Image (tube, helix red, strand yellow):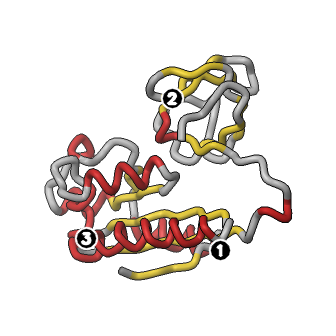
Amino acid sequence: MKAKVNDKIRIVNKMNDWSMDYKEGDIFTVESTWYGGVNVKSASGIPLSLDEVEYEILQEESPSDTGKKINVLFHADSERGIEKALQSAAGFLQYERGEKNLVELEILAEGEAVSGFQASSSNQELLCQLQKEGVKFAACKKAAESLHISEEEIILGIRMVESGIAELIEKQNQGFAYIKM
């Protein structure tokens, strides 16, 4: 779904590591749109151009129309595991959104699973669709290095983390349910 002027959006996947004008979780009002995203103004008044994989549109619903908030981390450390995580994420999102639940979902790849995040992977189409639906992705930098996979080979929008284990612990401390694939 494309954002329209005056829609409220939330940053879910910041892609510009150099900008200090916005961060994940920030909420903006759309001022104008372009074919690949939207234009907004930061709190300091600086114009920002955001790619559509960086944000989710906030739906205006009455409290009785919304369900509960669900935070989930799918963790994979094998090629088969990342395929299962992607398939499971698609089905999980469809079900929970049908229940009107607000879902925050991240898929973390460690070990051999990182190869499933390469642009040349057969997973690319499903992964990009899930990104558009707000799913966040993280790949262990150490695992990528051990597999001789450069950051440039990873699909755009996937966050590289220094340590997959540290990311997993951080998400669990934030209340994310942990599902091993």
User: In whole angstroms, how far apart are the C-alphas of marks 1 and 2?
Assistant: 30 Å
Label 1: how many Cα within 10 Å (few below 14, some 14–19, many 20+): few
Which residue is found at the position 51% from the left and 79% from the top? 178
- The CA distance from mark 1 to mark 3 is 24 Å
Q: Nearer the viewer, residue 87 or 114?
A: 87
Q: Which image quadrant is residue 143 in? A: bottom left
Under tag 3, what secondary structure?
A: helix
Vertical arrangement, residue 165 with respect to residue 7, above or below: below
Image location of residue 147, percent across then percent down: 16, 61
Q: Identify the residue at image location x=16%, y=49%.
A: 120
Secondary-structure class at tag 2 = strand
149 sits to left or right of 14:
left
Q: Residue at x 66, y 17 (%)?
A: 46
Which residue is label 3 attached to?
111
Q: Who is closer to the viewer here, 103 or 25?
A: 103
**Count of numbered marks:** 3
The amino acid pointed to by label 3 is: Gly
Q: Secondary structure at mark 1?
A: loop
For badge 1, the amino acid type reads Gly
Mark 2–mark 3 CB contact (< 8 Å): no
